[in-house]
Amino acid sequence: MEWKALNLVYLFVSFFIILNCSDLVGAHDQKMKFVLEKSDKIEADRDHHDQISSLKTYIVHVKKPQTSGVLSVSDQDLKTWYQTFLPSTTPTIATTRSSHYPRLVHAYKNVASGFAARLTADEVKAMEKKDGFVSAREEKIYSLHTTHTPKFLGLFQGLGLWNDSRLGEGVIVGLLDTGIWPDHPSFSDEGLPPPPAKWRGKCDFTGTLCNNKLIGARDFVTSTKSTGTKSPSGQPPFDLEGHGTHTSSTAAGNFVSGANAFGMANGTAAGIAPRAHLAMYRQENEEYLQYLCP
Ligand SMILES: *[C@@H]1O[C@H](CO)[C@@H](O)[C@H](O)[C@H]1NC(C)=O
């Protein structure tokens, strides 16, 4: 029984990392190193990050290149044509890492004539004047909302791993994140037993905000800011950003039926260990977390 519960936790942890830090998987090692390096390095990296962030990704449509009788254009010709729309100078980022951020992100060649590129707003204005330019639109990032994850992972109520692990019952999932919205329906304690007898944690939410689902809640931000020490402030760790609420419910959210995003992905939302307990430790520096998992 114990090992099966552990299996479930491992499965959840792996999936959880993929879900919440998917860009870490593809991110270059500089970002990973960022986590390991010392704090003076963090400042330098943050400056670098600010400079990089003045570049936005645009989807640019341009006319097809002039082909003078040739029927198909080679990929290289296409790329060369697209390059004529891009600034010839690299951005003024005084670091060797700028090579990790090439201007041309993708050259489209099948359905559309155009490309995706990293540009500043001024560079886009300059590009608009060029012959052959059609349109440029800043990319928009949509977040993925789904209720289908457990099914996708092969987890079904009353069967197999979910049944054998009793949906993570008896497991306590601790999170270091931006805090939590305790009244979110995913943190209802319906069907949950009280925390295991070994539990010694504390809940700094008042009233009934903590329950058999959310059994621990502490804030380490306020005290760190005022005293510089990492000790709990005694304040309730409300989630001002939403990230911690998202990660907590992905990990151990209870079943919520009728969940959907504007009618899409309608179904029963659940974490991967819906009967596990949760303990949230709100950490200093939401910016840092954003940098790690944008
Ligand atoms: C579900 O788990 C219980 C034990 O918790 C077991 O008795 C039962 O046979 C399992 N059902 C299936 C279909 O695996």
Image: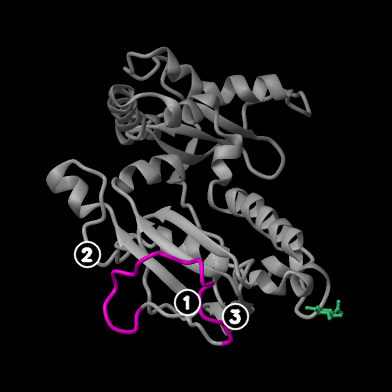
Q: Amino acid at mark 2?
A: Gln
35 is higher (above) or lower (below) than 266: above
SS at mark 1 in the image: helix
Q: Position of residue 226 (x, y in %)?
A: 12, 47
Q: Label 2: which residue?
A: 235
Of the two numbered discs 3 and 2 in the rendering, the one whose residue sits closer to the viewer: 2
Residue at the spot 45% in from the left edge and 38% down from the top edge? 57
Magenta span of residues: 191-209
Is residue 152 among what the camera can see?
Answer: yes
Measured Cα–Cα span from mark 3 to mark 1: 9 Å
112 is higher (above) or lower (below) than 53: below
Q: How many marks?
A: 3
Is residue 85 among what the camera can see?
Answer: no
- 217 falls in the magenta region: no
SS at mark 2 in the image: loop
Q: Position of residue 44 (x, y in %)?
A: 30, 23
Residue 65 lies in what quarter of the image?
top right
243 is higher (above) or lower (below) than 192: above
Q: Label 3: which residue?
A: 255
